[in-house]
Image (tube, rainbow, N blue to C red):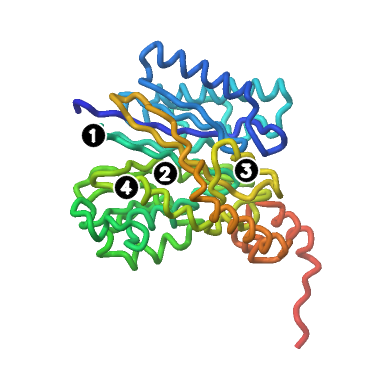
Amino acid sequence: MEGMITLSVIKADVGGFVGHSAMHSDLLEEAKGRLGGARSSGMIVDFHVTACGDDLELIMTHHRGVDNNEIHQLAWDVFVACTEAATRLKLYGAGQDLLADAFSGNVKGMGPGVAEMEFVERKSEPIIIFMADKTSAGAWNLPLYKMFADPFNTAGLIIAPSLHAGFRFEVHDVKREKRIFFDAPEELYDLLVFIGAAGRYIIKAVYAKDGEIGSVSSTQRLALIAGKYVGKDDPVCAVRCQGKFPAVGEVLEPFTMPHIVEGWMRGSHYGPLLPVPVSQATPSRFDGPPRVIAVGFQLADGRLVGPRDMFDDPGFDEARRSANALADVMRRHGPFEPHRLPMDEMEYTTLPQVMEKLQDRWEKLPE
């Protein structure tokens, strides 16, 4: 369709500097060079490269649609080249998100996280890309619910005619590989039954009632793909703002409450999601706490005008203070729940080996 643009956000952990805390500048420069070549050749319209913790984040615009083999091949080649650079530097966990030896047409199921959407660019097209580290794909459930369904967060649901009809949520069951759609506010309580269990039921996308896409997130669960713990999912999410979608301020507002997410050290703990500027997306305390960055762009014929660092704002200082206070409380629990994940979420860690080793020592209770 004339005027269609595709936004692709693809991420992978290709090696940490130092440990799992940050991204080495050589990897960022390698990615920028390769995507710069793709822009010069006309494969993509524009790009932005950044990092959240030890995750390399590729933001691209193009005219090739979602799930395009050439775009996914490009991202895969960037990740492989950056893995080679990480290996030379002996960075930690080089290429840990690349779960296949060779590209097979689409990076989905191969380790990287993917969020893509295709739409007609509006007269003014503000977009915010959220990227998180040390947490899982379900981390966006509560913020997306608040943005698109909670009138206490999004005043436009009440007072803006363009939002008053509500939105449609696409929810994925990542264990059964199924999906379902819910209309809000009509099916709000049914929606909440599922998305409150964020480890399994994940909001993939949100649409206006006319079908136009407003948000998309990555739903890849690394442990489910690999069958073991290889790193946390570290998800991405893109949200279109203004007009028939929530305003920029309404999209950012959910992150003033540092909600509890799974992840943190070895992906095995609950902790608060800390909203930080890009420069502070370098988790170190207990490999955390989990953090989120937000970069904003205005699209102009596919060109990414920006970015603006949306959390580089004293308005989020109180959220950061609250997150650190919550982090103190959670850490004091040590290996006890609710800091450590419940047993059914630990099946991809070393726990199964310990249970197998001790299985013959369990005795039947005396009568």
CB-based contact (under 8 Å), mark 1 and mark 4: no
* Horizontal arrangement in the rendering, residue 239 relative to residue 49 (left or right): left
State the quadrant of the N terminus. Answer: top left
Label whose residue precedes the other's in the sequence (1 or 4): 1
- Give the CA separation, mark 4 to mark 2: 18 Å
- Residue linked to disc 2: 217
Label whose residue precedes the other's in the sequence (2 or 1): 1
Residue reaching furthest top?
Answer: 41
In terms of secondary structure, where does tag 1 sit? loop
Kindly identify which numbered label has been placed on residue 122: 1
Label whose residue precedes the other's in the sequence (3 or 1): 1
Q: Amino acid at mark 1?
A: Arg
- Give the CA separation, mark 4 to mark 3: 34 Å
Q: Residue at the location (41% across, 62% down)? A: 194
In terms of secondary structure, where does tag 2 sit? strand
Label whose residue precedes the other's in the sequence (4 or 2): 2
Label whose residue precedes the other's in the sequence (4 or 3): 3
In terms of secondary structure, where does tag 3 sit? loop
Q: In which quadrant of the rendered view does residue 331 lie?
A: bottom right
| Residue 203 at x, y percent in the picture | 40, 52
Image depth: mark 2 or mark 1 in front: 1
- Residue linked to disc 3: 231
- Residue linked to disc 4: 247
> Foreground residue, 109 or 237?
237
Q: Amino acid at mark 2?
A: Ser
